[in-house]
Amino acid sequence: MVTDNDADMVDPGSEDAYELDRKRVAQILDAVEANDQALLTELMEPLHAADIADLLEQINAPDRAALIQLYGREFDGEILSELDESIREEVIGLLNPQVLAEAVRDLESDDVVDLLEDLEEPQQEAILQSLEDADRVAVQQSLSYPENSAGRLMQREVVMAPEHWTVGQAIDFMRESDNLPDQFYHVVLVDPRLHPVGNVTLGRIMGAKRDVRLTDIVEETFQIIPVDQDEEDVAYAFNQYHLISAPVVDDEGRLVGVITIDDAMIVLDEEHEEDILRLAGVSDGSLADRVIATTKQRFPWLAVNLGTAVLASLVIAQFEATIAQFVALAVLMPIVASMGGNAGTQSLTVAVRALATRDLTGSNVWRVIRREVLVGLLNGLAFAIIMGVVGIIWFGSTQLGGVIAVAMVINLVVAGLAGTVVPIILEKVGVDPALASGAFVTTVTDIVGFFAFLGLAGAVLF
């Protein structure tokens, strides 16, 4: 984060405008090494909690421990919320119990729940005991809901008003209240049974006269979230209907909390990140993970890829005699497989993304499959011409040029088909398409590519 005190100002339009200032980081580490608490506090004070979290994630473990110990009571609870899960538990373990208690008390209930979810039981108990009784009960109730549900995502601090109130009554209530949430966007209208009936934005309340009924200025878009709804569905609803906040209800339809757009977008961002990582065969992880942990995460899918590579090699082995008689085949066959793999990955990425955003449905699935196959056909024909000419010029064989051209068309068509159909089938059988599709599609394109090229070569050239 850059402040007026920085000697080197960063252009807000540059790519690194919001990155940590390296000069300030160096100064902070120098202050830690010199054990200068006053200077450290002065350097850290202008930084946002997210920037401090980034700093803690980027430095090594000994420096991190020394910084936290020296920073002491200045540690803000928001920093814990911004920290990557991989080092959050380590940081909590380094904090003085009193500092931890003060830091946690300032957090909203949803942030406390997010903090507790990934901690061991002793640390959970330590944090829960630091909360006031009412806050502790609210957090424990949220933790009782299923993991990755709306109940875990919501915050218990809700501003609600009876549906018969006027704007003036709502304003007076909020002015006199001592425990309003730090940030909120709506006043939730409820009936006598605490069933939410509408949302009124703060902007409409402030812009209306005091005698206007709240029911006359409710928002047109109003979505109620069941407490046990999957958080992925919640994030989809926020994105689909452009929600700012939404009330959460229990099994009897009573208001128990509210979900705000910042929490929903975090879930959406996490889902996107997870899909990207899984497409590469990488499970959840971060730059702060240790070597052994990262190795264990990646090993299973590398093993799967080894298995698929062996299958492709078995196909090649069936044409060993053909390759031995015509060495040019060994030079050209990786091109066919590589082009098929890349084309399949393109179709696969589009399909997985469309499934995640629910744009790919039963009503348009055949149109999408047909489109990807036709795209594969057209690209196949274009590259078939190129590779046919290359085969003729390079090896002086019209037949070889024709073989690789036909094989290219076949493999790119199959790649478009497999890249779309495989993730759809996997989703139907309950397997995450982002996690498993890549290995299947690569296997199909490799096997089809080698079989088509070498099979045609064996039939045409000999």
Image (tube, helix red, strand yellow):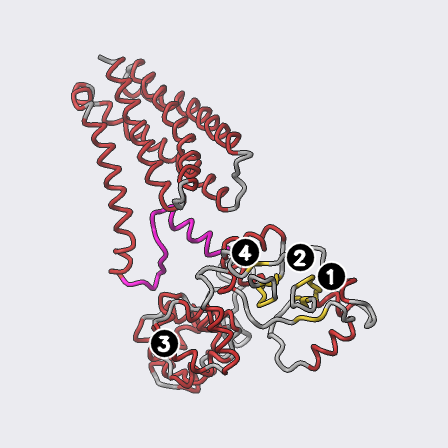
Quarter of the rendering containing residue 92: bottom left
Task: Residue under label 4, please give it.
Answer: 234
Q: Which residues are magenta?
A: 268-290
Mark 3 and 1 residues: CB-CB less than 8 Å, in contact?
A: no
Q: Where residue 441 appears, x then y in whole percent? A: 36, 36
Residue 419's place in the image compared with 47, above or below, is: above
Q: CA distance from mark 2 to mark 3?
A: 38 Å
Q: Nearer the viewer, residue 40 or 120?
A: 120
Which numbered disc flags the more N-terminal residue, 2 or 4? 2
Q: How many marks?
A: 4
Amino acid type, label 4: Val
Amino acid type, label 2: Phe
Quarter of the rendering containing residue 400: top left
Q: CA distance from mark 1 to mark 4?
A: 21 Å
Task: Residue under label 2, please give it.
Answer: 222
Amino acid type, label 1: Val
Mark 2 and 4 residues: CB-CB less than 8 Å, in contact?
A: no
Amino acid type, label 3: Gln
Q: Which mark is residue 218?
A: 1
